[in-house]
């Protein structure tokens, strides 16, 4: 009877006001007498409730209540999204594992890396930061990498596997940071697939040079820069970004070009000098190294820079060589070139405020690469633009949805396998002797991993056999290393070579090695225009290998310790240079010579020597 009364009450509702009065009536106040569920169902059974107003009548629609057992669409969407995120995470985990396997299978060390390792060996042996013991010359362009390797190898007491493990660890950290930047989605899958299959990125993630550290610092910078939680860059964040750039420049100075446009956008002119404080603090590591470099070496730039600046090859020839470097990448590593173009293009099309400056910086760096003639190492100068473009492309693909979203990573995989030697398919038999004839193209650009993998590859079949008889643990299975080791047992006082890495490291500090390419020799690096005369024709010079002729009497000078250089102007120049690189650090004479060299006051002596040769 009570339920019948409740139903008749509901039946009597003809307007919203009647419904309100019904809900406030005495009969409906008692939940025990009139169950709420019954009333709700009764109300729901009346789809239309007439609402009368003074202007006429209208109907108010009351949607039926969904059954208690039916899932809402929001719940279904959340479940589907969670399942999709889980699948993405598993796919990304598999790609990271694939990257680790590829890195181990392709791990190697190049000859040039051992130039730095000789300096580290001298440092750890008590000879200071020197290439030839007793001469303070900086032969490397990556002081932060050098200090990192010196520290880690001092802890482990071993070089070969330590450096390879360090490169692999830094590269995997770079991949994880890229995933953190892009999230679990098609953008991350595409970027990670590119990193796995790019020859440029994989080949120099080991190799022994500074590239894995440069990659890590760039990935950190992009992660912080693209962090969506920071809508406005505040001073601590700007300081952190500037610090990463300062560390990147201490790793390799020319990488500033990639970061520069973004740094400019972070400057706040309205803050005056106070606005520069984050940059001064952030650049402290680089500033500190520059101060140390002038005090210790006598010069602000590495010796390599002076060796290459002094070569006056016509602009057109250098630019043609730089363009040939890009063409070499297209031929041997199409995925890298296509990714760089696509990443930059998508950034300009989307015009997002934080992506565009990064894309501009990448373009600036590419222009610089072409302007300096590229490199003799195929793909090495493109690894940083590749990483930047891969992350920019990943950001453009973050919003991909639907059944066609898999096309982007699929295209990356297909393009990666179009390379002559895909990274995923190379391993212990990568560099047989019959392939070495094709390792360098007609422009002198060589596949460096192919050249040296058999000698230093972690999985190399040749090195595995050589390891059983090698006299030194981790010694490359290469004739240059063997000759260096033999020289260390019966050391000649002075040796002149054009390939100095393996030889110099295993020869040890008792052998004075003259680098004919001037990368490690302070005097030869500062002899200008001689190379320009000999190499005016592009067919007779190779980028990065600008061989100098030894001045008459120079070798005898190094053998005897007495200046025997025949040309009096060059002899005077050499005496002043020796004061800088061998004299006591803090003497008035040395600092006067440092000032004279860095302000161009000794250029007249060198010019007079060059004129005497014409």
Image (tube, helix red, strand yellow):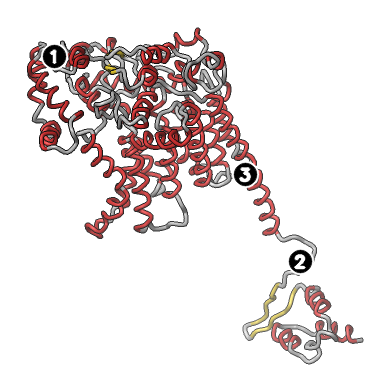
Q: Position of residue 495 (x, y in %)?
A: 29, 13
Which residue is disc 3 drawn over?
Answer: 89
Relative to 20, residue 113 above or below: above
User: Residue 347, relative to residue 378: is it above or below?
Assistant: below
Q: Residue at horizontal 35%, vertical 14%?
A: 443
Figure disc tally: 3
Pick whichever of labels 1 and 2 is earlier in the sequence: 2
Categorize mark 1 by other alpha carbons within 10 Å: few (<14), some (14-19), many (20+): some
Please determine whether, in this image, residue 54 is positioned above or below residue 346: below
Residue occupying the far bottom of the picture: 26
Q: Nearer the viewer, mark 1 or mark 2?
A: 1
The residue that appears at 21% across and 17% down in the rendered structure is 558
Side of 111 relative to 82 (left or right)? left
Crowding at dot 3, Cα within 10 Å, few <14 / some 14-19 / many 20+, comes out as some
Q: Is residue 533 left or right of residue 101?
A: left
Along the line of sight, the residue nearer the viewer: 380 or 49: 380
Q: Position of residue 312 (x, y in %)?
A: 20, 20
Residue shown at the point (41%, 49%) measured from the top left: 225
Residue 598, image quadrant = top left
Comparing labels 3 and 1, the label whose residue is closer to the camera = 1
**Side of 430 where 284 appears, left or right:** left
State the separation of the CA atoms marked 1 and 2.
Answer: 101 Å
Q: Which residue reaches farthest right?
A: 1
Residue 537 appears in the figure: yes
The N terminus lies in which quarter of the figure?
A: bottom right
Residue shown at 65%/82% (left/top)?
Answer: 56
Tag 2 secondary structure: loop
């Amino acid at each position: 009877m009570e339920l019948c009364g409740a139903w008749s009450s509901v039946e009597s509702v003809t307007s919203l006001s009647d419904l309100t009065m019904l809900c406030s009536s005495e009969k409906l106040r008692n939940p025990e007498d009139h169950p709420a569920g019954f009333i709700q169902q009764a109300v729901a059974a009346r789809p239309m409730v007439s609402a009368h107003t003074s202007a006429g009548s209208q109907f108010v629609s009351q949607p039926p209540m969904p059954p208690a057992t039916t899932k809402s669409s929001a719940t279904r969407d959340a479940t589907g999204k969670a399942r999709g995120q889980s699948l993405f995470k598993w796919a990304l985990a598999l790609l990271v594992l694939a990257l680790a396997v590829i890195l181990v299978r392709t791990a190697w060390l190049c000859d040039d890396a051992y130039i730095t390792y000789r300096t580290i060996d001298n440092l750890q042996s008590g000879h200071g930061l020197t290439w030839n013991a007793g001469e303070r010359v900086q032969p490397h362009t990556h002081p932060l990498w050098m200090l990192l390797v010196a520290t880690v190898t001092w802890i482990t007491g071993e070089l070969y596997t330590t450096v390879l493990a360090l490169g692999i660890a830094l590269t995997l950290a770079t991949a994880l940071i890229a995933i953190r930047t892009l999230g679990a989605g098609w953008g991350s899958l595409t970027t990670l697939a590119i990193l796995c299959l790019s020859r440029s990125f994989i080949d120099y993630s080991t190799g022994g040079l500074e590239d894995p550290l440069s990659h890590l610092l760039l990935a950190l910078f992009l992660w912080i820069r693209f962090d969506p939680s920071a809508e406005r860059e505040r001073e601590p964040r700007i300081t952190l970004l500037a610090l990463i750039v300062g560390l990147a420049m201490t790793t390799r100075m020319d990488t500033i070009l990639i970061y520069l446009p973004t740094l400019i956008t972070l400057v706040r002119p309205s803050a005056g000098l106070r606005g520069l404080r984050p940059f001064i603090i952030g650049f402290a590591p680089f500033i500190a190294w520059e101060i140390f470099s002038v005090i210790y070496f006598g010069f602000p730039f590495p010796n390599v820079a002076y060796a290459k600046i002094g070569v006056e090859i016509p602009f057109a020839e250098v630019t043609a060589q730089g363009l040939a470097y890009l063409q070499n990448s297209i031929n041997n590593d199409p995925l890298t070139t296509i990714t760089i173009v696509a990443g930059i293009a998508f950034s300009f099309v989307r015009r997002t405020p934080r992506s565009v400056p990064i894309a501009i910086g990448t373009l600036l760096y590419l222009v610089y690469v072409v302007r300096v003639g590229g490199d003799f190492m195929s793909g090495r100068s493109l690894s940083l633009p590749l990483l930047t473009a891969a992350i920019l492309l990943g950001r453009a693909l973050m919003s991909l949805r639907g059944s066609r979203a898999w096309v982007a990573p699929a295209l990356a995989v297909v393009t990666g396998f179009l390379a002559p030697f895909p990274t995923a398919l190379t391993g212990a038999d990568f560099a047989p002797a019959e392939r070495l004839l094709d390792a360098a193209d007609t422009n002198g650009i060589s596949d460096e991993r192919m050249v040296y993998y058999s000698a230093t590859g972690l999985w190399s079949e040749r090195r595995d056999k050589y390891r059983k008889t090698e006299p030194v643990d981790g010694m490359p299975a290469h004739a240059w290393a063997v000759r260096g080791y033999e020289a260390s047992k019966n050391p000649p006082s002075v040796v002149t070579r054009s390939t100095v890495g393996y030889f110099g490291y295993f020869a040890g500090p008792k052998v004075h090695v003259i680098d004919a390419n001037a990368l490690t020799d302070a005097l030869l690096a500062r002899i200008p225009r001689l190379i320009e005369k000999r190499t005016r024709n592009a067919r007779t010079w190779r980028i990065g290998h600008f061989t100098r002729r030894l001045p008459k009497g120079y070798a005898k000078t190094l053998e005897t310790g007495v200046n025997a250089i025949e040309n009096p102007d060059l002899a005077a120049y050499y005496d002043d240079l020796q004061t800088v690189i061998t004299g006591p650090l803090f003497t008035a004479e040395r600092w006067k010579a440092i000032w004279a060299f860095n302000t161009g006051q000794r250029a007249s002596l060198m010019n007079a020597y060059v004129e005497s040769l014409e």
